[in-house]
Image: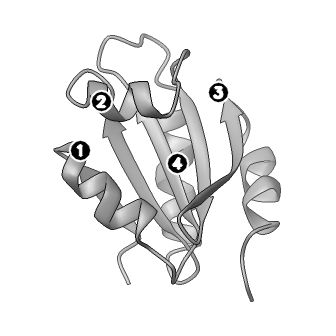
Amino acid sequence: MNSLFIILISFFFEKEVLENHVYPVLVDFWAPWCGPRMVGPVVDEIAQEYCELIKVVKINTDENPSVVTEHCIRSIPTLMIFKNGKRVDTVIGAVPKSTLATTLEKYINY
């Protein structure tokens, strides 16, 4: 499975994240104007390393304001973890890969 999916319109957020009951979903809320895109490469590495266990979704906050409002995104980057269509965890700001991996592993069914 290719775990990385980039959402272009908010309709796909519901389909790929909220209606997904197979894998935990890591959602990276990002914006092109956000200077320190330090979390982007970390998310990409996580997507590769956990490709059989999770789905990773990136959503541009500028192009999807309804999703941003619905999920109360106040800071970029914000990472949310969804399981069975429900948000189970949130990570705000750039974090080391090890921190993100530890957080994710709580929700993975091995």
Where is residue 61 drawn, in percent x and y? 33, 26
Q: How far apart, in angstroms, are the residues tagged by discs 3 and 1?
A: 24 Å
Where is residue 39 drawn, in percent x and y? 55, 34
Which residue is the site of mark 4? 43
Indicate which disc, 3 or 2, sits on the residue closer to the N terminus.
Answer: 2
Confirm or deny contact between disc 1 and disc 2 (CB under 8 A): yes
Q: How far apart, in angstroms, are the residues tagged by discs 4 and 1?
A: 20 Å
Kindly identify the amino acid type of the residue bearing the numbered disc 3: Ala
What residue do we see at 34% from left, 22% from top? 31
Where is residue 69 drawn, in percent x and y? 41, 24
Which residue is the site of mark 1? 10
Indicate which disc, 2 or 4, sits on the residue closer to the N terminus.
Answer: 4
Which residue is the site of mark 3? 94
Q: Nearer the viewer, mark 2 or mark 4?
A: 2
Which residue is the site of mark 2? 66
Question: Is 30 positioned to the left or the right of 108 in the image?
Answer: left
Question: Is 109 positioned to the left or the right of 66 in the image?
Answer: right
Indicate which disc, 3 or 4, sits on the residue closer to the N terminus.
Answer: 4
Q: Secondary structure at mark 1?
A: helix
Indicate which disc, 1 or 2, sits on the residue closer to the N terminus.
Answer: 1
What residue do we see at 58% from left, 80% from top? 53
Q: How far apart, in angstroms, are the residues tagged by discs 3 and 2?
A: 23 Å
Q: How far apart, in angstroms, are the residues tagged by discs 3 and 4?
A: 10 Å
Kindly identify the amino acid type of the residue bearing the numbered disc 1: Ser
Q: How far apart, in angstroms, are the residues tagged by discs 1 and 2?
A: 7 Å
Q: Which mark is residue 110?
A: none
What residue do we see at 74% from left, 89% from top? 110
Q: Count residues near mark 1 (Cα–Cα under 10 Å), then give few for <14, some for 14-19, many for 20+.
A: some
Q: Secondary structure at mark 4?
A: helix
Q: Vertical placement of 59 versus 34: above or below?
A: below
Q: How far apart, in angstroms, are the residues tagged by discs 2 and 4?
A: 23 Å
Q: Quadrant of residue 70?
A: top left
